[in-house]
Image (tube, helix red, strand yellow):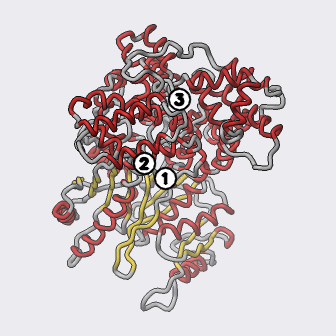
Amino acid sequence: MATGLQVTRVVLLGTTNSREGHETTLADCATGIRTALISDEGLCGARFPASAVSVVKVASPVIHDASAALAEWLGRNRATEVMVTCGSGAFALSAGAVCAALETHHAVRIAHIDAPMESYTLNQPTDPDLHLKSWLLRHRFWDALTEADPANATLWQILAARHAADSALMERLVIADHPELSSLAKRWPTVQAAIAERAGRGEAADYGLLRAWYGEQLRRCFGNEEGKLSPDTRDKIGRLVDALVTRADGNGHLSAHIRQAARSLNNDLGSACVRMIRDFRLTALYTNAATHQAHLQPEHRTQGPLPPTLLAAIQSWENGDPAVQLIARAGEPAWPVVGSGDVLALVAVGLDKPGVQTEDRHTAEAILAELWERRERLLRRGILRVRLLASPESLERAHRIAQDITAVHTDVDVRVIEGIKGGLDQVREAIVDALSSEAQPTGRTGSGSLRDVDEIILFLNPGPPLTNYGMIAAGVAWSLIAACPLSMMELTRVNSVTQVRGGRPVLARLGADRMLARLAISAIRRLDLRTARRLLERGSTRLQAVLPALEQLEAGLYGPCPREWRRTERIALARQRIRLIAHACSDHPGLAAYLTVTALRPVLFSWSTWKAMRTAYPALDQLSLLANQSEHSHALDRRPPGSGRRHNNRPHAGAHQPLIQAARQLGGTPETDTRLINLHKTVITTIESIFPEAG
């Protein structure tokens, strides 16, 4: 063959949809080509045995249909490598073939029919850990950074303690190694940091942090504004603050107090306190957290922007966080704590032609509609950033499209990347260089850096195939740099209407899978199981295959048991949960105790039953007290109103021994209570077996 490769099998893709003016389909044409290839005469100097040439029929000329059809065939016919041709005018079939090869875990090579000697491979990065530190930084997996970056292990240990809202451990680490950070180790700064870094994750511990944060945030805000408020407003907010920080009524129902205050506050609407109380989305979040069962509810597939006053508080905290400078000194700027909210689109622009302006406007609106929808899934609303890729021949058209978008949508950042030409490698390098040349990251929100985008979308159209493939390669490279999701969409026209299709994470096979595996393992180790699930969902089918086992682990740890279960069965499951938490989280005593109480009450034992169990089993009572002293529970809201003093009852000893004692007092042994521990280990080893170095 001209490429120097030994081709052992040929697969011809042909569509079965009708073609205007033709009686035969392209699948029929493919069958004719096969007949010629296996004949005695051969075709174009090549001849193959009948068993080596196949026709795969595709329902329509779109990427999804081509990928689905070929993936089914490749699943039955494994190959060492798949070479996909392009340049024949059927780019959707070519791109679909690449997606099918990736989805079925084949190496892929791309060859343009006009230059078959210059084939290109879509290999994964040669150094699988090249971008690992960036991904761990972006997702704030400080504990994993301790191993990945031992030179800065002390810093990562301090930040890991802060992330776990473990101010006692943080204080000990700071005193020993970073006394200049002593102010950060106090309880309130620790809770502020933890709520900011964990916002939107939806883990069991996070709902406790939200309740703790809300009361203290409102108390401090009221202290700043009390003298400026009208008497009526001051009285109403003061009563609410007292109820929140002292639990004065002893019966809960605090979310009802918040809603009642919100309805009655009609003055001082510019007050930060009033805005917080009247932030109905924040109240809904607090109400959900106050049920102590929010972590049991089905998770929304799209998170959506955070409540505005919570987002403003996080932004204020981030602006003053000294860890941003420390992280930068460790080698790389941090990412905005809840992301930038920006979405980046890469779009290749084809050759200009008469009458194309109306089509371009429709295409631009379809692209922007997809980007707006994607942005609504993020924790904050950022900027849509569109980069049009233009060759010298399409430059005028690209600038016209950019001007048309800007004229209608002044809040969209649209620019043209010029000089896109040559082969796949040249196109990739030109795009990555252009993206790198824009604003540099600062570690905080608002830098405008494309490294900080929260998602990248590639829009493929029937333009030059190597430009599209170069854009794919550049998108993969930039998504690894930005440590963010990458999606590939197809632009098609149906009845003269532009449509956007696709979005499957097949490109994760080109590098992101390995990063996602490492992060998921780290999350599972510390029992952040919803975070792990979202990470695996972003991966290819190989990672997504682990989801059922992960969901089984999550249900085993937090899920309800059947109503008909007897007390002995509930206690047996309780022992398993306690031992798993001891296995995974005992280094953070307050967190471990809080998770234990959350995993047992009220989902396994009612409040009244739990009260009786605390009397019957001293270790459970000790864990309950430890949980109440933690930052996730009542450590902040039980201080006397106006007091700036910290409690001295912060847990210093580890939680492992109390947890094991509780399991023993409930009648279990390590031999009978390790089912969840074994499942926890199995999920981790399953991911490690996909990418051995992920462990």
| Depth order, front residue of 177/198 | 198
- Residue 405, picture quadrant: bottom left
Q: Name the residue under label 2.
A: 476
| Depth order, front residue of 126/411 | 411
Q: Earlier in the sequence, mark 1 or mark 2?
A: 2
SS type, badge 3: loop
Q: In which quarter of the image is the C terminus?
A: top right
Q: Is residue 14 above or below residue 693?
A: below
Which residue is rendered at x = 38% and y = 9% of the image?
179
Q: Mark 3 points at which residue?
A: 633
> Is the residue under label 2 in contact with that under label 1 (CB below 8 Å)?
yes
Residue 689 appears in the picture as rendered = no
Q: Which amino acid does label 3 sit on?
A: Ser
Which residue is rendered at x = 61% and y = 50% of the image?
542
SS type, badge 2: helix
Label 3: few (<14), some (14–19) or many (≥20) C-alpha neighbours in 10 Å: many
Q: In this view, does 327 lie above or below 105?
A: above
Q: In the drawing, does residue 639 fall left or right of residue 528? A: left
Q: What residue type is labelled 2?
A: Val
Q: In the drawing, does residue 304 fall left or right of residue 619? A: left
SS type, badge 1: helix
Residue 507 marker: 1
Which residue is rendered at x = 28% and y = 41% of the image?
449
User: What distance separates the C-alpha of mark 3 from that of mark 1?
Assistant: 42 Å
